[in-house]
Amino acid sequence: MNEVKHRKLKISVLRYNPQDPESVPHMQTYELEEADGMTLFIALNEIREKLDPSLQFDYVCRAGICGSCAMLVNGRPALTCRQLTKDLGDEFTLAPLPVFELIGDLSVNTGKWMRGMSERLETWVHAKEQEIDLRRIEEPMDPELAEKLYEVDRCIECGCCVAGCGTARMREDFVGAVGLNKIARFKIDPRDTRSDDDFYELVGDDDGVFGCMSLLGCHDVCPKQLPLQTQIAYVRRKMVAMAFS
Amino acid sequence: MNRTLEVIAGSDLVERPRRSRWPARLDYLQSASGLVLALFMWAHMGFVSSILFGKNALWVVARTFEGYYFFGHRYPVIVSIAAAVVLALVIGHAALAVRKFPINYRQFRTFRGHMAMMRHGDTSLWFAQVVTGFALFFLASVHLYIIMSNPGKIGPYESSFRVWDQHLWPLYLLLLLAVEFHGGIGLYRLSVKWNWFGGSNPDEARHGLKVLKWAITVFFLAIGLATLATFIKIGITAHPIYGERYVPTWQQDALPGHGGQAAPVAGQPATTSQAGGAQ
Ligand code: HEM
Ligand code: SF4
Ligand code: SF4
Ligand code: FES
């Protein structure tokens, strides 16, 4: 076979270590030869192995499932393990997701934020206490509904929608599309006994669904292609209906 | 009066038992006021652009809204009341919308940085909506106040004198641009916000809505600019007879040489004007 000529990639990475008082945010450029089918995740590992062992970034699953590898690629949130370098130019930038606590370089603590959101929105099925009986057979669910639930339950809490949301950037208490999607998810779950009244208590204000200004950054950057626009519209309609009930 | 309630409310603990329903109402009212205003702006463009069909057309439209064809007399106060209602709507809508403005430099800078970095269409459109909305505070208020406080002075000459001799055309040009961009973006946002036309494929629908939004903006800007140009042209050519009222062609013949008020204002004696002076 002929030798395939590979591109030289110039990757500029935003580097900063908040633990080190000497450190100032700066861009550092790494040059790397592209490989066939290379993802950003592979590129970053190669940089760390061959060029700079001090570079910090996160990953676990390498398959778009764990949600830990999100960062800003050319200014837009994306999962590094799913981003093919061939879809990018010869030169591009990488930066940590904003909003979340910065651990160092490209590594951020999305878990802490997501946990706060989950506790605040109580993102678990609220079954009636007395009905919990582990030996009883679970009620069957209509397959169509189950399908719908799975569809929106695919969220991996990567934080892309939060980092891509102008509202979340401006107002730090905003629950974000990830939170509103979860409310929609539990709302259609027949096992959850919470009423619209209860959901209103959770998202019925300007830090909740009424804070969303429909910029749809969330929808356009979600790496799982969740239908966030319609999910948020659904929650909004239900919550506005509460005003007139 | 009820000091106890005031103290509870003032200390922010009023939300304890049950969250207020007001944020929901405000969100609804913001959309409703925006929708009514945007639809009104379409109708409004229909009325003023009648000048493109000739001076008589605008004259008929203006007299219609003064009730001339219903009561046989002109009641310009109807127009003043309508303008006051629109002004109230604008003020209400603006009061609701300022809740979304960046409220300090940090928020402003964060949003601008975010927008520049993301290069995402709908995010940038929102900023355009904030900027045009802010401009409308002033532009729309001035325009509406002038219409309100000049009862009976809407017509092919009357309006053109305002546009040209009274130097309002720069304001109207800015107002046109601000309203068309703001209203167009606003309607697009309303449809995605409430998922009105989502259908079975909301992503495709959104793309179509975006195209439609731009088409509507271009359409109304074109008509608006043509209308404004027509007023300016009339204002320039009719400059020598500044201050005169327009008399429709069929009444110019009916009142030879003498002139007289073509359509009398209710409760006012007919004033004379030089109908013959109108070329
Ligand atoms: C003083 C004048 C005005 C100001 C300050 C203003 C401001 C705003 C702002 C900031 C928004 C975005 C709100 C959000 O993101 O949730 C908005 C939305 C909107 N505006 Fe205006 N606006 C004004 C006048 C008008 C006029 C004259 C029209 C009609 C053409 C209009 C139609 C709309 C529509 C349809 C929306 C979308 C409503 C929504 O998102 O719920 N506005 N306005
Ligand atoms: S909704 Fe999408 S972008 Fe947001 S956290 Fe879930 S998977 Fe990530
Ligand atoms: S629609 Fe816009 S404002 Fe609402 S959550 Fe998504 S990005 Fe944020
Ligand atoms: S490493 Fe798990 S989603 Fe990318």
Image (cartoon, coloured by chain):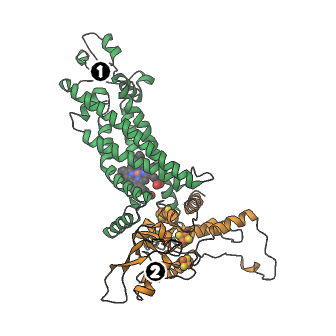
Chain colours: A orange, B green
Label 1 vs label 2: CA separation?
86 Å
Residue at numbered disc 2: A44
For the point 31% across and 83% down, which residue is it? A24
Residue A204: percent from left, percent from top: 54, 66
Q: Secondary structure at mark 1?
A: loop
| Residue B269 badge | 1
Disc 1 residue type?
Answer: Pro
Examine the rendering and report whether any part of residue A30 can be seen.
Answer: yes
Q: Residue furthest left?
A: B240
Q: Secondary structure at mark 2?
A: helix
Residue A103: percent from left, percent from top: 43, 85
> Mark 1, residues whose alpha carbon is within 10 Å: few (<14), some, or many (≥20)?
few
Q: State the quadrant of the C terminus of chain B.
A: top left
Relative placement, left or right, of A212 versus A182 is left
Disc 2 residue type?
Answer: Leu
Q: Chain of mark 2?
A: A
Where is B121 relative to A197, above or below?
above
For the point 29% across and 22% down, which residue is it? B246
For the residues bearing labels 1 and 2, Cβ distance under 8 angstroms: no
